[in-house]
Amino acid sequence: MKFKRTAIHDVIVCEPKIFGDERGYFVETFRQDKLEEFLEYKINFCQDNESKSSFGVLRGLHYQLPPFAQTKLVRVIKGSVLDVVVDVRKGSKTFGKHVSIELTGENKKQVLIPRGFAHGFIVLSEEATFAYKVDNYYSLEYDRGIAFDDKSLNIDWKVPVEKMQLSPKDTKQPLLEKAAYFENLIPLYE
């Protein structure tokens, strides 16, 4: 597996080797020892989640505050999504910046999203199956979000707004300037 840093240093793209022939393929989707060797810190994932969504479904931008902050390792099993990660660590040089990565069932790329980042994705294909690991459990009390259409973030979701499908929760998220931040989180790297 290859690991590559994005424009936001702590957000990592993981590219597994795909071994395929006329029978199908084999891919190793997670190797904790290799990931921790690259990161130089430990991650203890405790839960796997999966969702299925149709074209234009936008889920996000979500995160949890401490003590329930989460690191996520996300991937697409089937279909295609635009995955978006926003830095919400107040003291970071990249605060309010985002990266976008297309994840597909074919390219098998994954994104490691550390604690201190908001995350969302939009489905670009007819439907998509999205899976992810987290290192902390869900907490309604510490659940937060940012408006997907916050102009200060300047995110190109690649789907016209009139074709987007959002949950009631995601239509009511605050702008970044009014959202809760990770005030005292020391960035892992600078």
Image (cartoon, grey):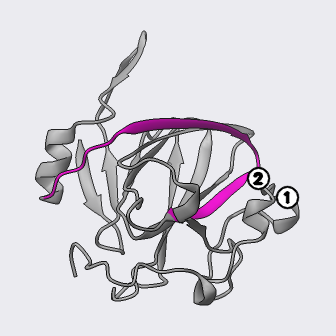
Q: Are marks 2 and 1 in contact (CB under 8 Å)?
A: yes
From the top left corner, tell me how far across and down residue 33 is, in percent: 14, 40
Residue at image position (35%, 48%) is 135
User: The residue under label 1 is which amino acid type?
Assistant: Lys
Residue extending farthest right: 162
Question: Gap in Å between the C-alphas at discs 2 and 1?
Answer: 6 Å
Q: Callout 1: few (<14), some (14-19), or many (20+) C-alpha neighbours within 10 Å?
A: few
Residue at image position (62%, 82%) is 154
Could you tell me what secondary structure mostly forms the magenta stretch? Answer: strand
The span shown in magenta is: 41-63
Label whose residue precedes the other's in the sequence (2 or 1): 2
Q: Quadrant of the N terminus?
A: top left
From the top left corner, tell me how far across and down residue 171 is, in percent: 78, 67
Number of on-image labels: 2
Nearer the observer, 160 or 133: 133
Nearer the observer, 156 or 39: 39
Q: Is residue 55 magenta?
A: yes
Judging by the rendered image, the residue that carries numbered circle 1 is: 163
From the top left corner, tell me how far across and down residue 180 is, in percent: 53, 80
Look at the picture and state if 24 lies above or below 36.
above
Q: Is residue 70 left or right of residue 44?
A: right
Q: Quadrant of the C terminus?
A: bottom left
Look at the picture and state if 46 lies above or below 92.
above
Residue at image position (62%, 75%) is 155
Judging by the rendered image, the residue that carries numbered circle 2 is: 56
Q: Is residue 153 left or right of residue 163?
A: left
